[in-house]
Amino acid sequence: MYLHIGEDIVVNGKDIIGVFDFETATLSKNTQNYLKDKEKKGKTVTIGKEMPKAFIVVEGKKEIHSKVYLTLVSSLTLKRRAENYKLMEL
């Protein structure tokens, strides 16, 4: 299953560690520090030019494939898409 996360970007569902609401998750200092660290390491991909609504943590088999995607698509919409794709695979 591949999940469309905004614009022309899709990620392999097997590689997704988590999908987080940007507004509520970034209230935590730990999350803020995590995102800052990923940005410093060049592991952040921003999709769109507006304030992100969600971020997706992706861990690939190789370190080069591990990224954090900041997207304009809400975490609820991403959840629904993932559920719909899973139903289609059955």
Image (spheres, grey):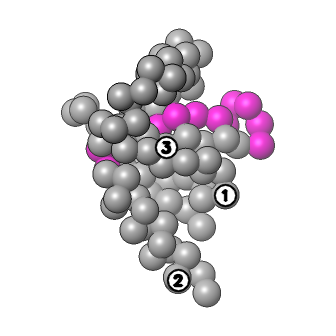
Any mark on residue 88, and which? Answer: 2
Q: Are marks 3 and 1 in contact (CB under 8 Å)?
A: no
Question: Callout 3, which amino acid?
Answer: Ile
Q: Is residue 50 above or below residue 39?
A: below
Q: Which residues are magenta?
A: 61-73
20 to the left or right of 34: left
Question: Callout 2, which amino acid?
Answer: Met
**Mark 2 or mark 3, which has the lower sequence index?**
3
Q: Which residue is mark 1?
A: 14
Taking the view exactly as shown, the residue that stands out farthest to the left is: 50
Measure how far apart labels 2 and 3 are at the Cα level.
22 Å
Q: Is residue 15 above or below residue 71?
A: below
Q: Quadrant of the C terminus?
A: bottom right
- Give coordinates of residue 16: x percent, y percent: 60, 50
Taking the view exactly as shown, the residue that stands out farthest to the right is: 61
> Which residue occupies 55% across, 16% down?
37
- Give coordinates of residue 52: x percent, y percent: 30, 36
Q: Quadrant of the N terminus?
A: bottom right
Q: Is residue 9 visible?
A: no
Q: Is residue 89 visible?
A: yes
26 to the left or right of 51: right
Q: Nearer the viewer, residue 6 or 14?
A: 14
Q: Residues within 10 Å of mark 1 (few under 14, many from 20)?
A: few
Q: Secondary structure at mark 2?
A: helix
Q: Which residue is mark 3?
A: 56
Q: Secondary structure at mark 3?
A: strand
Question: Callout 1, which amino acid?
Answer: Lys
